[in-house]
Image: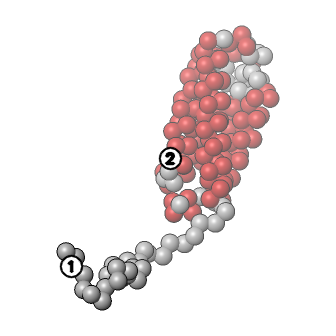
């Protein structure tokens, strides 16, 4: 036996009996959010590049063009290797924070991209083309994070 009245045809108006809930108005993100995703992707790539560069410095220092005495900062390649690995690890972690829209990741991303550019500038005599490419990518990261960072949190 059904509990419906004889007048009930079994059809209801859409949303009848359901209280309406309104979501708070969120501003629509613009296309500039793509710059943060771009910066996060570049930070991930540069992080991996720095780890590779560090591992090469640790295990195959004969790969580089000059002896450690020919570098801007006169330290051995083992030290350079650990510096590059540390910068790469921080960049990889920062890129994950950037993908999540974390404000701290934007701040750390700019700082570590500046440090990475300086370290690669000092490392230019060892492998010029690689270091110049990494410096250029660091500049793109800094630009994207400083000019277009605020909207990523809302996505």
Placement of the N terminus among the 4 image quadrants: bottom left
Helix, strand or loop under label 2: helix
**Viewer-side residue, 37 vs 112:** 37
Residue at the (65%, 24%) spot, across then down: 53
- The residue at which mark 2 appears reads as 97
Q: Closer to the camera: disc 1 or disc 2?
A: 1
Q: Position of residue 85 (x, y in %)?
A: 57, 26
Mark drawn on residue 143 = none
Rendering quarter of residue 126: top right
Visible residue check, residue 115: no
Give above or below for 13 relative to 109: below
* Left or right relative to 1: residue 126: right
Give the distance between the C-alpha atoms of the residues marked 1 and 2, in whole angstroms.
Answer: 55 Å
Visible residue check, residue 117: yes
* Left or right relative to 146: residue 66: right
Residue at the (67%, 62%) spot, across then down: 31
- The residue at which mark 1 appears reads as 3
Label total for image = 2
Rendering quarter of residue 76: top right
Rendering quarter of residue 82: top right
Give the mark nearest the N terminus, 1 or 2: 1
Q: Residues within 10 Å of mark 1 (few under 14, many from 20)?
A: few
Q: Position of residue 19 (x, y in %)?
A: 33, 80
Residue at the (66%, 61%) spot, across then down: 32
Residue at the (65%, 35%) spot, across then down: 46
Helix, strand or loop under label 1: loop
């Amino acid at each position: 036996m059904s509990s419906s009245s004889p007048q009930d045809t079994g059809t209801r108006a859409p949303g009848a009996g359901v209280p309406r809930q309104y979501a708070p108005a969120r501003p629509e993100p613009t296309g500039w959010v793509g710059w943060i995703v771009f910066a996060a992707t570049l930070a991930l790539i540069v992080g991996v590049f720095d780890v590779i560069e560090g591992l090469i410095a640790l295990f195959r220092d004969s790969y580089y063009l000059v002896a450690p005495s020919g570098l801007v900062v006169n330290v051995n390649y083992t030290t350079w290797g650990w510096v590059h690995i540390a910068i790469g690890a921080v960049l990889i972690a920062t890129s994950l924070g950037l993908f999540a829209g974390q404000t701290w990741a934007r701040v750390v991303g700019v700082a570590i991209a500046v440090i990475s550019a300086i370290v690669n500038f000092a490392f230019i005599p060892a492998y010029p083309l690689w270091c110049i490419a990494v410096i250029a990518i660091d500049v793109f990261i800094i630009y994207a994070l400083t000019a277009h960072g605020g909207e990523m949190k809302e996505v």
